[in-house]
Image (cartoon, grey):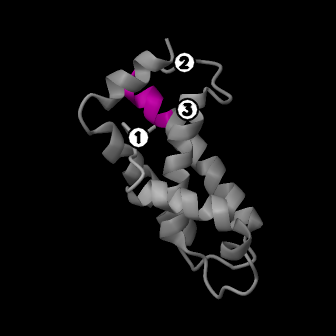
Amino acid sequence: MDKFLAPHTPEAVAHSHVSQNSWDIHSHHLDFFDESLVACSASYHAFDCYLSGADLFILPRTRSELESVLRRYSYDSIHNAISRSRSTLQPGGYSRVCHHAEASIRNVLNTGDNVATLLSITK
């Protein structure tokens, strides 16, 4: 996992924070839903799920198929965060969270030979 999202990246930090403090982040005491935190965590979770092979029945063969799988995992994570949250999203918040997570995924895929490495892992 460190090859794709090292422990110091915003995604890894967000995922660690959400995992360790999920009851705090999603409690009714917060007045806002931290879109950036959820998006970064969702991106990290997407790669984590892919690398573990979770619910991966048809293996991706191309970059676009790989990106589609990763987006699906991130959307699942976003939906889970929204369902656990007692705070409401601001207008347009869902779109912003999804867009931020997608941008993070594309950034990882555009780095070095990450696409080839990820596609070869599942073979």
Q: Do the residues labelled 1 and 3 touch (CB within 8 Å)?
A: no
Percent position (x, y) of residue 61?
44, 17
Q: How crowded is mark 3: few (under 14 residues within 10 Å), some or many (20 or more)?
A: some
Inspect the image, locate mark 3, and give the three-letter code of the amino acid beneath it.
Tyr
Asked if one can make out residue 98 in the rendered structure from this viewpoint, the answer is: no
Residue 5 on image: x %, y %: 40, 45
Q: What residue type is labelled 1?
A: Asp
- What main secondary structure does the magenta stretch of the protein show? helix
Q: Residues within 10 Å of mark 2 (few under 14, many from 20)?
A: few
Residue to which mark 1 is pinned: 2
- Is 63 covered by the magenta stretch? yes
Q: Which of marks 2 and 1 is in front?
A: 1
Relative horizontal placement of residue 100, taking residue 90 as reference (left or right): left
Residue 63 versus residue 38 in the image, above or below: above
Of circles 1 and 3, which is in front? 1
Residue in the foreground of this view, choosing between 7 and 82:
7
User: Residue at the location (64% across, 58% down)?
Assistant: 19
Which region is colored magenta?
62-68
Q: Which amino acid does label 2 sit on?
A: Leu
Q: Residue 59 carries which label?
A: 2
Q: Earlier in the sequence, mark 3 or mark 2?
A: 3
Secondary structure beneath dot 2 equals loop
Residue drawn where x is 47% and y is 54% of the image: 12
At horizontal 53% and vertical 30% (from top left) the residue drawn is 51
Compared with 19, 69 (above or below) is: above
The residue wearing badge 3 is 50
Distance of label 3 from label 2 (alpha carbons) = 10 Å
Q: Position of residue 23 (x, y in %)?
A: 74, 70
Task: Find numbered disc 3 in the image and state the secondary structure of the residue it sits on.
Answer: helix
Q: What element carries label 1?
A: loop
